Image (cartoon, rainbow, N blue to C red):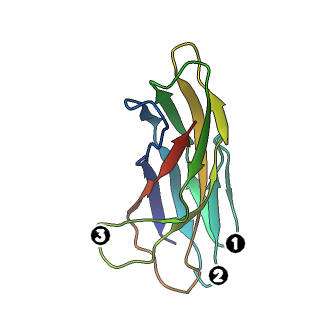
Amino acid sequence: MVNKKVFAGLVVAILTSLHCYSEVITEENLSFGVFAIKNNSSISELSVSANGRTSTTNSIRVLRGGQAAQIRLVNYPLYTRLFISAILPQSSTVFAGMTEQFSINHVDMPETVITNYLGEAIFPLGATIETSGNGGAYLDTTYNFRLMLTVNY
């Protein structure tokens, strides 16, 4: 068994209609924790829900649970409904050699949020990653993701 550490750094694309100085701030990074893959001969999934619950399918065993991200949207119009979506799938990157990659195939977040009297909204974000399932090996290293979000109103 090999321990895996997977973090999703969020790079956010902001697509807005009118407001040029809107920002998306990652207050807490999404982390999938530390886990082991017993066998990569079939696709396995690891999910961290928006409420922080960790679950797996098939050959992934969680050694330390992950945590959901906390995303803050700022400088939007007051009391406005914002529509949020993710560009999927996204593949992991590794800086430690040749290895199989994970992909994010699902994001757990609200489809809409409403800004407050400051033009801000905060929401949790979870996601599901999956293995390649092709029998290849994963290195014992940190895997990173860049997750692109769009925000429209």
- Give the structural element (helix, strand or loop) at label 3: loop
Residue at 64% x, 77% y: name it.
Answer: 43
What's the residue type where badge 1 is placed?
Answer: Asn
Task: Name the residue tied to disc 3.
Answer: 96
1 and 2 marks in contact (CB < 8 Å): yes
- Give the structural element (helix, strand or loop) at label 2: loop
3 and 2 marks in contact (CB < 8 Å): no
Q: Position of residue 23 (x, y in %)?
A: 41, 32
Depth check: give the residue in front, 146 or 58: 146
**Left or right of 105, for residue 12:** left
User: Dot 2: within a 10 Å radius of its alpha carbon, few (fewer than 14), some, or many (20 or more) residues?
Assistant: few
**Left or right of 94, for residue 103:** right
Task: Name the residue tied to disc 1.
Answer: 58
Q: Earlier in the sequence, mark 3 or mark 2?
A: 2
Kindly report the distance in space between the C-alpha atoms of the residues bearing marks 3 and 2: 24 Å
Residue at 59% x, 81% y: name it.
Answer: 133
3 and 1 marks in contact (CB < 8 Å): no
What's the residue type where badge 3 is placed?
Answer: Ala
Residue at 56% x, 73% y: name it.
Answer: 131
Residue at 44% x, 42% y: name it.
Answer: 14
